[in-house]
């Protein structure tokens, strides 16, 4: 399943949207039980989220659920939604290691009750407070279930993360670079190799802005994008799919290194640049992804 290029938010109570989401081809869907659900509907939305997981499984789409915070109904959310096809929990307002560990223990129990494999459900912490942002590495390291932290790469709209940090977001994004890079580094340093960037703060129909932010997220090291509108999925999938030029370049780099090895060399001049073993992991990663997407020349 990993890496995921795109995760599309859908309010958990909008089952018609879930039924039709396959035509947009998201790599995964996040059924939202938190901010996108009116308070009076949250209890009923749990059963709808469980039904939505089944609908997504039938479409071959991994289903994640953004629960409520641990002390705001998150425990009840998890108890209601663990079922076959449930890929992971996105945990909002993540602040402490104890919260992650409590969710880990809860998921272990619910996996067993539902007959799911141990640790088949992942955790994606979403730090949105100053405390959580500061301790992000500890959150990512708190459980082997954590696959990646959720960071933010946004336009000029103040959300929870901007408010917690105290910055005013802009499209240029200079004020966000430290925090975004910190989320990527904290996640990878903790052994959670798939940090995801939430792309927010643009007009829904401003696809050029969405493309700008998504490309920025990739350049900063995020492994995929979390999106709020179906029209944004294609942009994320394109941004995180190796281009024919990248595939050709990195396939050639791997072959050049193989030839160097046969000569007894560990470095080679490749297209005017000196490359060695340090460049191989990225090249191999790109070719693996190309192979997974059936993009290699036949």
Image: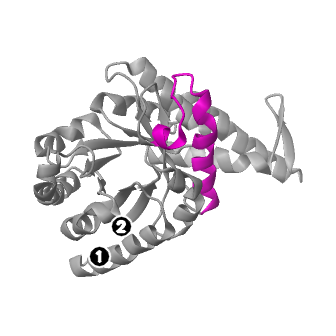
Q: Left or right? Give the position of 42 relative to 159.
A: left
State the residue position of label 2. 121
Residue shown at the point (89%, 54%) measured from the top left: 264
Q: Quadrant of residue 102?
A: bottom left
Residue shown at the point (51%, 28%) measured from the top left: 169
> Residue 111, which numbered label?
1
Q: Is residue 281 magenta?
A: no
Q: Residues within 10 Å of mark 1 (few under 14, many from 20)?
A: many
Dot 2 falls on a residue whose secondary structure is loop
Q: Where is residue 236? Give x, y as percent.
A: 42, 34
Q: Which residues are magenta?
A: 161-190
Q: CA distance from mark 1 to mark 2?
A: 8 Å
Q: Are marks 1 and 2 in contact (CB under 8 Å)?
A: yes
Q: Quadrant of residue 123?
A: bottom left
Residue shown at the point (40%, 64%) measured from the top left: 122
Q: Nearer the viewer, residue 96 or 91?
A: 96
Q: Is residue 182 magenta?
A: yes
Q: Nearer the viewer, residue 47 or 219?
A: 47
Q: Nearer the viewer, residue 204 or 34?
A: 34
Q: Where is residue 70? Give x, y as percent.
A: 34, 64
Q: Left or right? Give the position of 28 relative to 33.
A: right
Q: Where is residue 31? Give x, y as percent.
A: 25, 50
Q: Can residue 119 be seen by looking at this rendering? A: no
- For the stretch drawn in magenta, the main secondary structure is helix
Residue shown at the point (58%, 54%) measured from the top left: 134
> Residue 119, which numbered label?
none
Sequence-first tag of 1 and 2: 1
Q: Residues within 10 Å of mark 2 (few under 14, many from 20)?
A: many
Q: Left or right? Give the position of 48 relative to 66.
A: left
Q: Can residue 288 be seen by looking at this rendering? A: yes
Would you place residue 273 above or below residue 279 in this image?
Answer: above
């Amino acid at each position: 399943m990993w890496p995921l290029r795109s995760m599309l938010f859908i309010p958990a109570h909008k089952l018609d949207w879930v039924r039709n989401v396959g035509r947009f081809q998201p790599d995964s869907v996040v059924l939202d039980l938190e901010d996108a659900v009116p308070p009076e509907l949250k209890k009923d939305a749990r059963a709808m989220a469980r039904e939505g997981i089944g609908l997504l499984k039938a479409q071959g789409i991994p289903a994640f659920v953004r629960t409520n915070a641990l002390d705001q109904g998150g425990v009840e959310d998890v108890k209601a939604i663990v079922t076959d096809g449930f890929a992971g929990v996105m945990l909002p307002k993540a602040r402490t290691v104890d919260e992650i560990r409590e969710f880990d223990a809860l998921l272990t129990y619910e996996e067993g009750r539902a007959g799911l494999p141990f640790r088949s459900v992942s955790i994606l912490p979403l730090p949105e407070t100053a405390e959580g942002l500061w301790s992000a590495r500890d959150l990512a390291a708190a459980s082997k279930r954590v696959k990646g932290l959720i960071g933010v790469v946004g336009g000029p709209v103040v959300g929870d993360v901007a408010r917690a940090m105290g910055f005013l977001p802009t499209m240029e994004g200079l004020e966000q670079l430290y925090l975004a890079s910190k989320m990527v580094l904290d996640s990878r340093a903790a052994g959670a190799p798939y940090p995801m960037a939430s792309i927010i703060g643009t007009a829904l129909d401003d696809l050029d802005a969405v493309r700008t932010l998504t490309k920025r997220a990739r350049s900063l090291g995020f492994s995929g994008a979390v999106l709020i509108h179906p029209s944004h999925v294609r942009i994320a999938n394109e941004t995180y799919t190796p281009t024919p030029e990248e595939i050709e370049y990195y396939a050639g780099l791997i072959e050049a290194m193989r030839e160097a090895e046969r000569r007894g060399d560990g470095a080679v001049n490749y297209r005017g640049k000196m490359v060695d073993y340090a460049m191989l992991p990225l090249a191999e990663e790109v070719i693996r992804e190309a192979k997974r997407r059936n993009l290699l020349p036949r």
